[in-house]
């Protein structure tokens, strides 16, 4: 019985002495703006925040395409976030377009937001230009 408190204290000491200095990865998410030059590092993730209507004909078919003539930026993913309650009609669905820089340099990318199928008329496609400077 006298050994139990000693073992308990030793166990508590070992648990509290663990190395908590592990390197933490920081997700540097930079929101891109169309009205300025965006400065990114190679370790950053660029994000474009868009939205589409909830419950409309284009809800599930809204897509994005990236055009970068210098191939300095790559489309990583498109995340869909719906913060509305399931029984609500209408509203907005958020879209996060994530891009990653591949090389350093200056580029201008064109981001196309496509409503519906790609074969539809040009008036269902909207484009935004973003100027980006990528550094180390």
Image: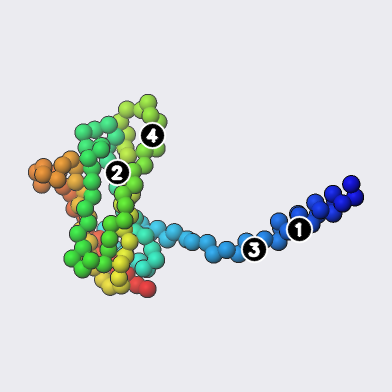
Q: Which residue is mark 4?
A: 84
**Circle 4: element type:** loop
Mark nearer the N terminus (3 vs 4): 3
Disc 3 vs disc 2: Cβ atoms closer than 8 Å?
no
- Residue at 32 percent across and 46 percent down: it is 95
Q: CA distance from mark 1 to mark 4?
A: 47 Å
Q: Nearer the viewer, mark 1 or mark 2?
A: 1
Q: Position of residue 38 (x, y in %)?
A: 31, 64
Measure how far apart labels 2 and 4 are at the Cα level. 13 Å
SS assignment at label 3: loop
Q: Is residue 74 left or right of residue 124?
A: right
Mark 2, residue position: 51
Q: Residue 93: where, in percent of width, then height?
A: 32, 39
- Give the residue number, with chain letter if any, for mark 3: 19
Q: Earlier in the sequence, mark 3 or mark 2?
A: 3
Label 2, secondary structure: give it. strand
Q: Residues within 10 Å of mark 3 (few under 14, many from 20)?
A: few
Q: Earlier in the sequence, mark 3 or mark 1?
A: 1
Circle 4 packing at 10 Å, graded few (<14), some (14-19), many (20+), is few
Element on which disc 1 rests: helix
**Residue placed under numbered mark 1 in the picture:** 13
């Amino acid at each position: 019985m006298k050994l139990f408190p000693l073992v308990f204290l030793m166990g508590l000491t070992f648990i509290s002495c663990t190395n908590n200095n592990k390197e933490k990865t920081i997700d540097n998410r930079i929101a891109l703006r169309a009205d300025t030059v965006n400065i990114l590092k190679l370790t950053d993730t660029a994000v474009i925040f868009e939205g589409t209507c909830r419950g409309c004909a284009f809800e599930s078919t809204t897509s994005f395409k990236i055009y970068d003539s210098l191939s300095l930026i790559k489309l990583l993913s498109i995340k869909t976030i719906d913060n509305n309650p399931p029984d609500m009609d209408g509203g907005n669905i958020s879209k996060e377009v994530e891009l990653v820089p591949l090389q350093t340099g200056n580029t201008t990318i064109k981001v196309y937001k496509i409503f519906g199928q790609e074969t539809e008329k040009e008036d269902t496609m909207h484009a935004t230009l973003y100027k980006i400077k990528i550094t180390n």
